[in-house]
Amino acid sequence: MKLDLPKYKTSDEVDFVVVGSGAAGGIMAKELSTNGFRVVVLEQGPYLTESDFVHDEVRVIGEDLLTNKPKLQPTSFRKTPNEKAKPQRALVYGRLVGGTSVHFTANFWRFHEIDFVERSKIGPVPGADLRDWPITYADLEPYYTKVEWEIGVSGLAGASPFDPPRSKPYPMPPLPVKGSGVIFERAARKLGWHPFPAPMAILSQSRPGRSACINCGFCLAFGCEVGAKSSSLATAIRMAEKTGRCEIRPNSYVHRIEMDSNGRATGAVYFDEKRNTHLQKAKAVVVCANGAETPRLLLLSANKQFPNGLANSSGVVGKYLMLNSGGVTNAVFEHPLNDYKGFAVSRLLHDFYELDPQKVGFYGGGGIDARFDATPIAFAMGGLPPGTPGWGKAFKDTLAHNFTRTMELFCHGTSLAVETNSFSLDPDLKDAWGLPALCLTYKDHPDDLKLWAWQNQRANELLDAAGALKKWSQPIGEQQFAVHLLGTCRMGNDPKTSVINSDHRTHDVKNLFLCDGSSLVTSGRGQPTMTIEALSFRAADRITALAKRGEIA
Amino acid sequence: MIENLSRRNFLTRGSAAVSAVWLSAHWPAIVAAAEHAHQAAKSSAPPKFQFFTPEEAAEIDAIAARIIPSDETPGAREAGVVYFIDRGLTTFAVDDRKTYREGLPALQARVRELFPSVEKFSTATPDQQDQILHSLDDQAGPAPRRRSASTSNSFFQAVRIHTIVGFLIDPDSGGNRDGVGWKVIGRDREHMFQPPFGYYDKDYAGWQPNPPNPEKTKA
């Protein structure tokens, strides 16, 4: 069935133009259009649907079918601002309608109370700018619940004793347990820890037009061809289109926010597929382009009134980037787990969510999940124990033995906000449209690396308790590749140290709003998308209220 | 690009989660090759090489057969990897063609250097072949030297990566003829599964709640 979708003229001043259609942009578009507004969503990537999704690792991973294109969008990296950045692939994000939510793992933890008030609780951390949020967990709770019910999250309320309060249970039971989950659950309990079924944005029960997960095994990095993964593509975008008031315009690369002489945004300037330039006029602009592209767009939109970038009177646009600390430990077991079947994660634990800095000697906290997320080629390239030859009989034999017997423990953790960690415009490197490329500047705070090592120790303890035949932790090292893109236009009450207020309105431009990973003040414990989506539901409520009171235009 | 390929490089920010990322960051443009290779794999007519001469194809086939040898289970040869690579190179980036064009004569030179009596790689004994490949593989050994961009190493790494890809790619996407690569690693051909999936979850008794009200762990 083809919906009767609106097609707005660029000269038609719509109520909102939303830049980006991912986790945040999809929900923003759905909420604003549902609330009666006329909305145009400008998405730089293509509009693919379920039938376009394949299990071909070459096309999806090798060719970046779903993600940003290094050839068109080169990037650079440096550790510190006084170095000259070198061109290298520095980040990955979903570049299609639905954004990164199309190819993500779909781990969907809520943040806990502590994530919003940690500065008050533990005080300052040297070398970082740890701050409280201007909102609390209680402010966001109703919106977490909205995400779970409207977008579709499977899980078991009350299963983790560390969970924050919730107003409703999950709308559907957890996904089935995998072998990695059973091994994890048994071993964690031996150690006195509290494993629980992972909350996942993947359907365990069908919904209209969407199948429950069929356990195909091509999940992380792939689009879901049965709509079981609760991407914006499979959920919010469709709901937005059903309102009849929302136009999704793909292949539209926004590169400037247009401003008038009164300091008011008048629309978004974009290249279409043929690289013709258009201005979509709008009464207000909401940028949901992710934690890298949102600050980049503000910096690209510098003008006489905003010489350092739009909405950047604070100078913090692009700064305080947080990537989340990582840590992976692999293990091989005696019998086949066949963990390639299914989604990635079925069990996790939050016993270490809130570590006491006085006791462990560093700031931080995290969660550990049990998973297997490697597709066959990816596994052959990186899933074998260190020291395994890269070819020949020993390579083949190890590959053949281990593929069905391997699992991973993935430790997710905090990253501290450090001013010099940022996305900025590279002074030399240009993209295929001739615009300045993204430069990633990043050096993990020492505490982030200490947390990584500490959690790796716990992972090894667990695998010992589980009786792993072999285990090895991936080396700990400073990150130079960004997946989680957080904190670069952070929320705050003080216009001198933040970019947006708690309504997601920029301090400097009355009708310009930002909502995505860039809004985050702290990094959480490694799973940001649930919070990005809850923020988007909440921001849409705030923006709607402002618009209805005539306080935007 | 090829010189950046190594397990070591991969492991610097390890995790299979990031492996996807890593592959896309470092994988040479293997690209749409798959569809062509798939047709070749499906076709009952004797496949024709598009990029290699028959002699070159025999050399590549012989290398692939040492990278993933055929023994009691199928190897690169049974998976039709040489056809995957050949069809791949007809749509490859120019850089990758150059790597093969320059690599094949370099291989020949290495064969003569190490085994003057051997005519070409494909006629050497398996042991000789392994010695030759080890001499090309800068990443062999417990403590890999700093990666060099030497032609022969780039060539070997390209063939190695492409062989693994051609062996393990989704058989419906070209390569991995008859799914033999997946059979070897124990990956069922289906794309739809029901639990229990394996040994450890088949006797799972069901979820039992955690003890209530634990003291919040503070390490």
Image (cartoon, coloured by chain):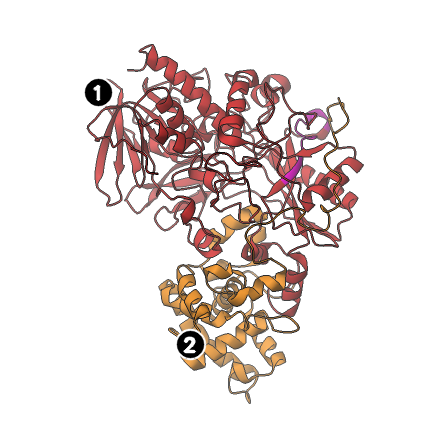
Chain colours: A red, B orange
Near mark 2 (Cα within 10 A), the count class, few <14, some 14-19 or many ≥20, is few
Which segment did they paint magenta? A346-359
- Image quadrant containing the N terminus of chain B: bottom left
Can residue B13 be seen?
A: no
Q: Quadrant of residue A370?
A: top right
A107 w.r.t. B214: above or below: below
- Secondary structure, mark 1, is loop
Label 1 neighbourhood size at 10 Å, few (<14), some (14-19), many (20+)?
few
Count of numbered tags: 2
Residue A302 in view here: yes
Name the residue rendered at 66%, 65% in the picture. A397
Residue carrying label 1: A261
- Image point (37%, 68%), residue name: B90
Q: Which residue sits at x=55%, y=42%?
A: A213
Amino acid type of the residue tagged 1 in the rendering: Ser
**Residue A204, located in which quarter of the rendered image?**
top right
Which residue is located at x 65 percent, y 52 percent? Answer: A338
Residue B161 % position (x, y): 51, 63
In magenta segment, residue A174: no
**Helix, strand or loop at mark 2:** loop
Dot label at residue B45: 2
